[in-house]
Image (cartoon, rainbow, N blue to C red):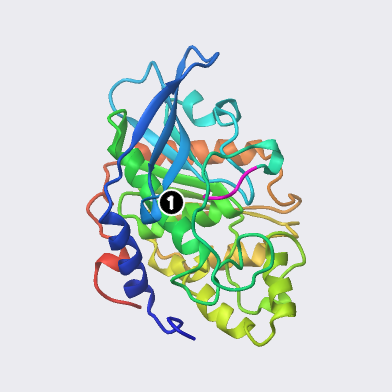
Amino acid sequence: MHGAEEQPAAFWRTALEEAEAVPLDPATVEEPTALPGTAVYDFSFAGAHGHRIHGWLMVPRAGDGPLPCVVQYLGYGEGRGHALDRLLWPALGYATLVVDTRGQSGAGGRRGATPDPVGLTHPQVPGFTTRGVLDPRTYYYRDAYTDAVRAVAAAAAHPAVDPARVATAGCSQGGQLALAAAVLSPLVAAALVESPFLSAVTDLARLPDRQPYRELLRFAESYPDLAPRALRSLRLFDVAELAVHGRCPALFSVAGRDGRCAPETGYAAHARYPAEKRLLTWPMAEHAAPNTPLRLAEAEFLADIFTRQPAQADTPAFWQEGHDT
């Protein structure tokens, strides 16, 4: 059970201060595209352990001064794909950073450009959700959450971006990473959290037999003696647990017919989030289904947040305050 009793503030302070010891070292190379109104850059930075994390940075050419930026995180297995896949926010006049999730690529035909050099520490079910799960210090999502926080910092440091107006966004695993980054980074001004994965996980044996929860379910079936230890590790990464430390405005969205990230798990994250928040429920929607009304609501939400004074700019994240709750 090594490391399993560690408290959230101490755990994340160690992880993120360790990452901060390595310079972000952002690299930006403009990509030729057929988009006359948007500059597209192959963008990379140093994530956890100094590993290079890649993404697309897209900046409207007609922008006046530093722009708001939406950092977009991806669903399970997806890579950054092509820049043409992610044009909503540039079309609305915002910069956007589409961030690879380390080691993931190919889902939905979208390839990534970021490997994961970290090795395995114990037998696992194929995939990422059980990789290193017996110790929170070796768990895959320790690095993935750190990468997500570093992505916000890299976006905020770019000269085209207004560092006081950076939002996070994503669906499923992307919603998980968007919420984690919003809680762990003091730089996030708003979060768009859609059907978050790894939320309100209390019993591995009762998880849905759908990817990526299926990997944790199979792990519990194959290693029942190790399942309690894995569950203790997961508490440090469960976004319903992290949500209690939220500090920026957040828009939560839940799909009523979601068989993958069950509605009650999204409701749990929203219920525990103490800062300004809004909840949208789509009763007939399935997981990650195309949803134009949601995109319009997200655009309206961010337009409101980005026109306010940046009241959250100097508010530290919970792990920087030196206490646990």
Where's the C terminus, which quadrant? Answer: bottom left
Note whether 306 is above or below 1 in the view shown. above
Q: Position of residue 231 (x, y in %)?
A: 57, 79
Residue 194 appears in view: no
Which residue type carries mark 1? Ala
Tell me the residue at 53%/73% (across/down). 234
Residue 67 appears in view: yes
Is 302 in front, or is 106?
A: 106
Q: Position of residue 10 (x, y in %)?
A: 32, 74
> Does the segment drawn in magenta span residue 286?
no
- Judging by the rendered image, the residue that carries numbered circle 1 is 148
Q: Position of residue 145 (x, y in %)?
A: 45, 58
Residue extent of the magenta highlight:
101-105
Task: Tell me which secondary structure the magenta stretch mostly adopts.
Answer: loop
Q: Residue furthest left?
A: 314
Mark 1 crowd level (few <14, some 14–19, many ≥20, 10 Å Cα):
many
Q: Position of residue 241 (x, y in %)?
A: 48, 71
Label tally = 1
Tell me the residue at 44%/38% (across/down). 70
Tell me the residue at 49%/11% (across/down). 36
Note whether 76 is above or below 110 in the view shown. below
Note whether 183 is above or below 174 in the view shown. below
Q: Is residue 292 left or right of residue 238?
A: right
Occupied quadrant, residue 8: bottom left
Mark 1: secondary structure: helix
Is 219 in front, or is 92?
A: 219
Q: Is residue 213 left or right of residue 278?
A: right
Note whether 200 is above or below 152 in the view shown. below
